[in-house]
Amino acid sequence: MSTIISIPAEYGYVLASIMASTFVNQYHGTLVGIERKSANVPYPNAYATHAEATSDIKKYRFNCAQRAHQNFLEHFPTFIAASAIAGLKYPVATAVMGAVWNVGRIVFARGYINSTQEQKGAGRYKGAWYLLAELGLLGTACYTAYQMIM
């Protein structure tokens, strides 16, 4: 049995949301670069040592920026795939969830970087609501796939 896929007129919003996420990725990378320079952590070191980060807030902030970016990259493929699939049937809802996800990722990074050593990165929870959008995208993508199979 064949399935014909027609791209809805509103799919452009989904593509805009996905493209916006690439700028969020660049923003994360820029934050890492700024914090790396401020902390004076040379390449190719991915992180400052635990001892350095414990005693120097700049090095701690660099580690948090680096970790926020890594976390973004861990979730990025899921976001792109789920958005591309879910948008085939639910383009407007997908684009809205994508916008929420993008804003949440920025808030997550800023909160993480602005945490103190005592907070142990807890500022990231300010943007953790991006996960609700991600779960919504995953559920919608799974349902879209199910509809195409049945």
Image (cartoon, helix red, strand yellow):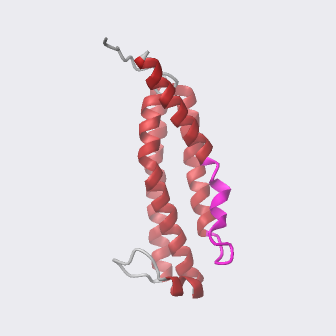
Horizontal side of 6 relative to 119 (left or right) equals left
Q: Residue furthest top?
A: 1
Q: Which quadrant does the N terminus fall into?
A: top left
Queried whether the magenta region covers residue 128, the answer comes back as yes
Q: Is residue 44 above or below residue 78?
A: below
The residue located at (58%, 36%) in the rendering is 136
Q: Quadrant of residue 53?
A: bottom right
Queried whether the magenta region covers residue 141, the answer comes back as no
The residue located at (62%, 42%) in the rendering is 132
Q: Position of residue 2 (x, y in %)?
A: 31, 13
Q: Position of residue 56 (x, y in %)?
A: 57, 86
Q: Is residue 28 visible?
A: no
Q: Is residue 64 above or below residue 52?
A: above
* Magenta span: 114-130
As rendered, which of 126 and 49 lies closer to the eye? 49
Q: Which quadrant does the C terminus fall into?
A: top left
The residue located at (58%, 84%) in the rendering is 54
Horizontal side of 90 relative to 19 (left or right) equals right
Q: Position of residue 20 (x, y in %)?
A: 47, 44
The residue located at (50%, 80%) in the rendering is 38
Q: Is residue 145 visible?
A: yes
Q: Is residue 100 above or below residue 9?
A: below
Q: Quadrant of residue 3?
A: top left
Q: Position of residue 139 (x, y in %)?
A: 54, 32
